[in-house]
Image: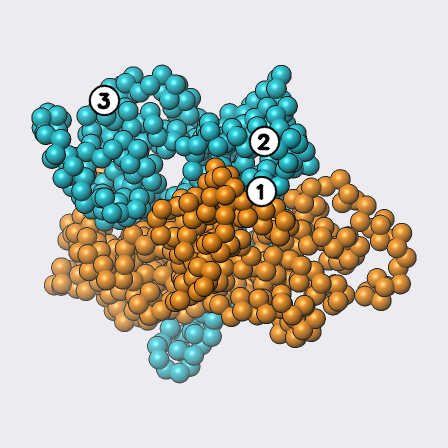
Chain colours: A cyan, B orange
Amino acid sequence: MNQKQMLRPATDAATTAAPLANFNTADAVEYLNTLPIAAAVDLLAALPLPRAVKLLEAPELQRAGELVATLPPARAAALLGLMADDRATDIVHELDQDERARLVPLIGAEARQVIQTLLSYPPDTAGALMTTEFVSVPANWTVGQTLQHIREVERTRETVYAIYVLDPASGQLRQVVTMRRLITGLPDESILDVAQVNAPVTVDVAMDQEEVAQLIRRHDLLAIPVVDAGMQMLGIVTVDDILDALIEESTEDAHKFGGMEALEKPYMQIGFLEMLRKRGGWLSVLFLGEMLTASAMQHYEDELARAVVLTLFIPLIMSSGGNSGSQATSLLIRSLALRELRLRDWWKVALRELPTGIVLGTILGSLAMVRIVIWQLGGLHDYGEHWLLLALTVAAALVGIVTFGSLSGSMLPFALKRLGFDPASASAPFVATLVDVTGLVIYFSIAASILHGTLL
Amino acid sequence: MNQKQMLRPATDAATTAAPLANFNTADAVEYLNTLPIAAAVDLLAALPLPRAVKLLEAPELQRAGELVATLPPARAAALLGLMADDRATDIVHELDQDERARLVPLIGAEARQVIQTLLSYPPDTAGALMTTEFVSVPANWTVGQTLQHIREVERTRETVYAIYVLDPASGQLRQVVTMRRLITGLPDESILDVAQVNAPVTVDVAMDQEEVAQLIRRHDLLAIPVVDAGMQMLGIVTVDDILDALIEESTEDAHKFGGMEALEKPYMQIGFLEMLRKRGGWLSVLFLGEMLTASAMQHYEDELARAVVLTLFIPLIMSSGGNSGSQATSLLIRSLALRELRLRDWWKVALRELPTGIVLGTILGSLAMVRIVIWQLGGLHDYGEHWLLLALTVAAALVGIVTFGSLSGSMLPFALKRLGFDPASASAPFVATLVDVTGLVIYFSIAASILHGTLL
């Protein structure tokens, strides 16, 4: 394929690239996404470099890693070297070890160093998200010099989020100037005269992206500078990068909460086997956990044989525990993600969930009572002579199980966070499984004590 | 309280406002959030107007509606009139009918009209999210005139996202100029010479905010113009508004997927009764739905009495249906939200979920088989003489239920969308309830046909 590429005459390349001539970047990306990989690679190889760079930089481009790995290596390295460093890093991230080893050494030294540094930051942190391309000027410059600098040196940059003013001696970040304020300044004024009065808001490379997003929102910024301990600027995280990151994270969290591994590609583009792996893994783990319910049921087999009527309410009772747990878990995953609550607040939450669970359980218990009474007295079903005791058992079990579900569902995200996991790994099915086994034990224990001497 | 406010001498107001003197806006907002409502109102009333406006505009300010409703009406109206129109609209949105009727007429005519227009757009649309404050210039202006305009007329605006170039005769949107390009232009050049070459990307007032976010991402914009059918600009949606909206929507969707009404406030700030209402409502609805499982079980009571061993696997089988359904639902809610799939693609998804469900069900069925065989042959539990048939029944039921769970879980978001609901209203507990009843019917039907003549 590469060879075929090389031998192809120049006119052919022009023909290949022709369909894209009238497309803007977004439409061209959409078109590329529909092509088979070989055709998309041909197109990327035939396009002028700056145009190909624009397409590869688009976050909507699918299979970017695959495309780069399939391109002639020299071309791929040239494209990676010209791209925005954060996006180039994302693409290198998608490559496997062999592909990286082959391509990265071919990238120009300067871009290569930046990419390698960015690769070293853990995913979902400010470091992994930042770009090292930003406009900075020394504090002894004037407004006029800064404008001239942006016009000439920074002319390839489409958007200037802000101008960062550095101490000329130490290189430390001192102030931030917005474009809006820059153009109000007189050419001879010092750049410091148009800077914002407050000290700049900065973040550390290791800060989690959700926290960076909160800061960008709180301070209404278009970009936030990332600094090291000595206030040297390492890069900026822009509001559009945060937007991309949060949309991706929302999707991942939704998948995880649904009880599966997060998919990294759109639904229709996941291979059948990959889909099975992402879903089958968790489904099997949950299934193995849920097998404990069979063990619990076996333990109570004698009671079940004596009082078959008890089994009628098992699905109802178990699902209520799972539902109340799922509510509490989804609430607390978000509260922890948004930093509304900290790890140390767990006991405040427990103190709220306890009465909440008791009241919710009492509501459901009353509904169950009403249902059994109506069915029995209305002649819809005969629950036997001890139907009132049965109703009491079901109601009491619901109070116990909903309380347990709310409590354990709310504590699970804290526990995961305490153990160093992402609280968002707590899924609705996971909570349901956790609550189901205990739910059965609660139900049969209550049944044993209320129905002892009558049904049991 | 208002009276007390009026009678208080000026020095007292200064004292009240003193704690905020050294805070930046974000910290001041955090401080306000910790105060009792009366103290926070006193503070807002004592601060200079522009400072109070800044605080009310912060999206992190909690209880903004309550604060505005408690302030002296004249002061509240003045603040609303000076605020960014989109944020003022958000706050008016939080007021009840009486409070709106009292306050809105006091707002200055111009701001009032804008707020009333913005209030009329449905929530979560471009119209509801947009601000009407943007910089526009006629196409016959020069770069110099535009710069002068931004310096003088638009001096209160902290951020200029872009400059919108309108046709001087028709007022239609013609081009967009970024700040970056504006400053590269020569003062005498036409503004059109520094405009972007492509036609501007615009959205309709009715467009859903997720779709607006996708467009802003695709085209790498800081703001997107909202236009009517005649290309007249109505406002802009900025990337920071989209960020706020998406974070809120993620939280709402997470709560909904957890099976409850979305909370609008942080966990610890919701009153106990409101929390009960938001959770108890859905929990009761799901409970009533789940009562059908009791009816289904009653229907099979004879079979249950004859073969108690069948009940042992009910929780295991039902939870697997719920889990596979929850996976499929979470996958498709996100795919629909991100516009990866359209309503008309439902059959493609169904054609994928069918084999996926069958394979996943077969995996779980095999696990169940292995478990029963090991327990039986290992002497851990005696499932009776027909244990092999029982194992077959459980395995076959799992294939059926997991397939049904995957299919119905994936179709539910499409069905909700088709009916005009938000696909994100499909929750894990909702799917589980849907699958549970059918799951029982599948299990007992398979049991009846496999075990007929032996256990049943």
Q: Are marks 1 and 2 on the same chain?
A: yes
Report helix, strand or loop for mark 2: helix
Q: Residue at x 46, y 29 (%)?
A: A152
Q: Is residue A115 above or below residue B159?
A: above
- Indicate the quadrant where residue B393 lies: bottom left
- Kindly identify which residue carries mark 2: A144
Task: Name the residue type under label 1.
Answer: Arg
| Residue under pointer 3 | A74
For residue A129, what is the image quadrant? top left
**In the displayed structure, does residue A315 sit left or right of residue B44?**
left
Query: Distance from label 2 to label 3 (Cα)?
Result: 41 Å
Mark 3 burial class by Cα count in 10 Å: few <14, some 14-19, many 20+: few
**Front-lying residue, B210 or A304:** B210
Q: Mark 1 and 2 residues: CB-CB less than 8 Å, in contact?
A: no
Mark 1 — on which chain does it sit? A
Seen in the picture, residue A440 relative to A262 is either above or below; the reply is below
Q: Are marks 1 and 3 on the same chain?
A: yes
Identified by mark 3, the residue type is: Ala
